[in-house]
Image (cartoon, grey):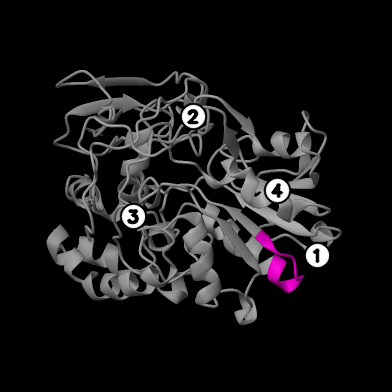
Amino acid sequence: MKLTLFKNTVLFFLFLGFSCGSESTASTTTKNKPITNTKPTPPTHTPPQLSVGANQTESYLSLLNGKRVAIVANQTSVIFKNKTQTAYTHIVDSLLQRHVDVKKVFAPEHGFRGTADAGELVKDGIDTKTGLPIVSLYGKNKKPSAEQLEGIDMVIFDIQDVGARFYTYISSLHYVMEACAEHNIPVLILDRPNPNGHYIDGPILEPQHQSFVGMHPIPVVHGLTIGEYSKMINGEQWLNNNLQCELTVIPVKHYKRDMAYSLPIKPSPNLPNDSSINLYPSLCFFEGTNVSAGRGTDLQFQIYGSPYLSNTNFEFTPKPNEGAKYPKYKNQLCYGFNLSSEKPLEELNLSYLINAYNNTKDKSAFFISNGFFTKLAGTKKLQEQIEAGLTEAQIKATWKNGLEAFEKLRQQYFIYN
């Protein structure tokens, strides 16, 4: 469901070369036109300076006085030093410099430095720069244990999200809040913009399909920031035994949800730029099929294809690279489509998925048999609808009532207009 239009005259941030990761060794060729990446149009006026929660130290340092602190953080957890967000200090380093008693770091999927593959086991360790212990929240240990929280007076959560239900940082948020609620430890959320905050769309997750890639009855694209989402978790009593966590949110200054936001640091290895982040909610469904979404190339989540598709105009060969040590169809030629130059989406696009299904040689092998597609969709209905030949419009019509109900629900937790 499209709620608002993306505004072209919005904040424009230079994307760091540092944050773009290592250069891929994958080969990509097109039969039609050269590969290009569109960039946001520079603003024609100077908007009020957006300031993320972490930057507002005057609003939260006093809350940390005399506290033994743990922080849930990754490579996006920074305090910016300039208006273009091209210079920054990691929040852990900044807090230590300010003599905050940081005891440990909890690391979500992809790890503290954000270099682990999707789904890769993240191990406990020691941060070589600070000497702080790093505790993984991805793998067998998704929820901080009583032992891991022993001696902690406050937990800070500062992670850049991208607004999709199956992006696991909001699942980590749930488990951190739940563990802290069980042990009477307050949580401080340092909020950041949602780059997909301008719309909501997708089927509502059904309880029987709950997993770490979908824990709550929300659509695929929820249109909330981490701070707003934490309020919803509390307000809807989604924590175990209807617990509620003591919560403080430091909002983003001068932010509106229909504001385009170009992430200065990639939030995970396979979301390297604005295009990939915008396309991610629509292309991630391919993770539950025999189609590649571009892992193992330099166009992750901007292309899709497989060795089995027909009627395509683009070719690529996945090869191991940062964030994809073992990509789907490693060293195999794939046929598909390049979406990197498409206009930004303002709704989920199911045409990619339907087109791939209709043009695959063996439809019985399209959906992976392990049920992962159902976990991503949050329902069995989407696969059944595609197999039955329903159009995109017909499928989306079945989401209408759920999205209208969710829209009313989420407005109760808005921090931003």
Residue, disc 1? 146
Label 3: how many residues lie within 10 Å, few (<14), some (14-19) or many (20+)?
many
Q: Is residue 232 above or below residue 53?
A: below
Residue, disc 3? 367
Residue at image location 55% in from the left, 47% down from the top? 53
Residue, disc 2? 85
**Residue 18: where, in percent of width, then height?**
52, 22
What is the number of the mark on residue 242? none
* Name of the residue lying farthest toward the bottom: 241
Q: CA distance from mark 4 to mark 3?
A: 49 Å
Q: Which tag is nearer the camera, tag 2 or tag 4?
A: 4
Residue, disc 4? 61
Q: Which tag is nearer the camera, tag 4 or tag 3?
A: 4
Frontmost residue, 331 versus 116: 116
Q: CA distance from mark 1 to mark 4?
A: 25 Å
Frontmost residue, 42 versus 355: 42
- Callout 2–callout 3 Cβ contact below 8 Å: no
- Callout 4–callout 3 Cβ contact below 8 Å: no
Q: Viewed as shown, does residue 83 lie left or right of 115?
A: left
